[in-house]
Amino acid sequence: MEYLTSGITASFDMYFFRRAYAQSNIDCGFRTVICTAFSDSTEDMSEVEREYTDLNAIHPLISLKYGFHAEYTTGVPKLLELRELLQKYHAPVFAHNSETHSEVQGCIERYGKTPTELFEDLGLFEYGGGGYHCVYMSDRDLEIVKNRRLWIVTNPASNLKLASGIAPISKYIDLGLNLAIGTDGPASNNALDMFREMYLTTVLQKVTLSDAAACDADNVLSMATVGGAHAMGLDNCDVIAPGKEADLIVIDLSRPNMRPLNNITKNIVYSGSKENVRLTMVAGKVLYENGEFFIGEEPERVYQDAEAIIREIAGLQV
């Protein structure tokens, strides 16, 4: 529901309980690309493979990508097991990568190389993929990203909340890298708001470089839309055109924050907010319009269930 109010038509989520998550998305009509949360705690490789084949065939709204949590939670033996699946299915792979300085330094201490170099040397990027965050990337890392045509998914609000750092997105743009924008999860962000993410993506570059013209709004809007779709493998959901999926949103340009209409792209990136999202459509079905949800569940019931569950987790009386 929060995705829909933010004008998001598809999610790219690395988490657990993937079969139940897939079914919940099918039930409400939302498109999602699920990413496996592979790590050293993953014991049953056969189940990982079954999920890959099953969930990629379960429904047009659902697809699954191979992914592992991060280098520091996934040792080389497990990564080599995962590589076998990547090679078998000619599949890309995604992971949290170089999110913090300590993560990179820890990997160098363990292996004498950065996470990106380690993954490359292990043969994980033969069929592409990408990394979430990518805040601390060496020049060699960026060569690998460019040569392998990997995707960098920046998550500026999460990086600020966790004091992880600021990814040098302007540098990545100048290098011609494949870029997309994400929110990260609610545990490390709280708000799943792509308008906030777009704004932070551009203004953080401006203040870091002391250049008000850095990271143009056109680049940012492209990263949040076309870039996100291509990073997720949703090449048929990238633009509004004949033959493409009818995944789209309607933005109200009559609100005060959108006037005057000097430059609509800049209005969206610098002035836009969830207030302006009037309609969100996925696969031709309206799931949100003018504050109302059409997801097969009553919003109040969803709120009540969520409140009850969180109070139970916290050990409070329900």
Image (spheres, rainbow, N blue to C red):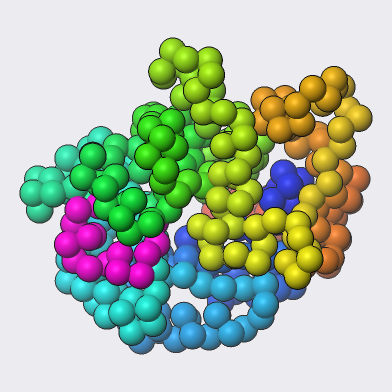
Q: Give me the residue at 32% from left, 51% from top.
A: 145
Residue 85, picture quadrant: bottom left
Does the stretch in magenta take in 128?
A: yes
Query: Who's the residue at 38% across and 56% down the image?
Result: 150
The span shown in magenta is 116-130
Q: Position of residue 47 (x, y in %)?
A: 40, 84
Relative to residue 121, is residue 278 drawn left or right? right
Is 272 placed above or below 115 here? Answer: above
Q: Report whether 39 appears left or right of 280.
A: left
Please tell me whether residue 220 is drawn above or below residue 48 in the rendered image: above
Res. 26 visible in picture: yes
Query: Can you give x and y, in whole percent of width and height, for residue 189 in the image?
Result: 53, 39
**Residue 177 location in percent, x, y?**
41, 46
Instruction: Please tell me whether residue 100 belongs to the stretch shown in magenta.
Output: no
Percent of width and height locating residue 210: 44, 13
| Side of 37 relative to 272 (left or right) | left
The residue shown at (41%, 19%) is: 208
| Residue 188 in view | no
